Amino acid sequence: KELNFVDLFKEVGYLLPDNVAIDMIWIVREDMFPENEDGSNLSLQLTTNLRLSIILGTYGDSLNPDFDMDGPPDMIIGMNAGLFAYESWRHVISYLHHHKNVVGVFTDYNEHSGINCASLGGWKSANSFEMNPFRQMRAMPVYCMNLPQFSNGFVYVYNEQELDE
């Protein structure tokens, strides 16, 4: 679904100062990977300072958590992550517990799930749980549960950092 918004991410590149470069790496499950000619990973240079790589795999299972880069990523973002719903997230949680300098930002569609998932990161993470201020709420039709359901409706942060001014 996020691939439909690549042009919006491109706009972010135009807003960045010239001395800031961002490499975004999206990890996509095999059943959600976009079709391409040779079935390989995709790399898109969106602007001069913003590159998007789309990698086939599962974080921590089939992929090196550091992505074979010079060091750990600055941030891991999971949209509608559902950390309890997918076993593959256990590697991400473990990675964040061992790399306190890596920030993890997650959204969830279910309030109950989000509260429980946020608590996996400890007290500070659980305390960060809130309705997503960047999202206009639109209820999702989930008929099997009588719980609040909003796409990307709730947000929480692991290893929150203070920025130097």
Image (cartoon, helix red, strand yellow):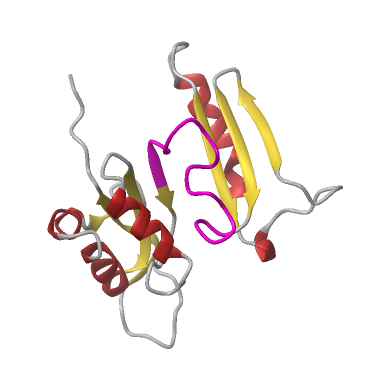
In this figure, what is the number of numbered marks? 0
Q: Looking at the image, which residue sits at the far bottom?
A: 144
Q: Residue 16 vs residue 155: left or right?
A: right
- Residue 71 lies in magenta, yes or no? yes
Left or right relative to 120: residue 134: right
Residue 24 lies in the magenta-colored region: no
Q: Residue at x 52, y 20 (%)?
A: 14
| Residue 81 visible somewhere in the drawing | no
Along the viewing direction, whichever of 159 and 156 lies nearer the viewer: 159
Residue 4's x, y, as percent? 62, 48
Foreground pick, 72 / 146: 72
Residue 139 shows in the view: yes
> Which quadrant is the C terminus positioned in?
top left
- Going by the picture, which residue comes out furthest to the top? 18
Please name whichever residue, 43 or 101, is drawn nearer the observer in this view of the structure.
101
Residue numbers of the magenta segment: 58-76
Locate residue 114, reporting x and y percent: 29, 66
Position of residue 78 in the picture relative to residue 99 (left or right) = right
| Quadrant for the N terminus in the image | bottom right
Residue 62 point in image, percent of width and height? 59, 58
Residue 18: % across, % down: 47, 11
The structure residue drawn at horizontal position 68% and vertical position 36%, both measured from the top left corner, is 43
Q: Quadrant of residue 29?
A: bottom right
Q: Which residue does the image show at 67% across and 33% down from the upper left?
A: 44
Majority secondary structure of magenta residues: loop
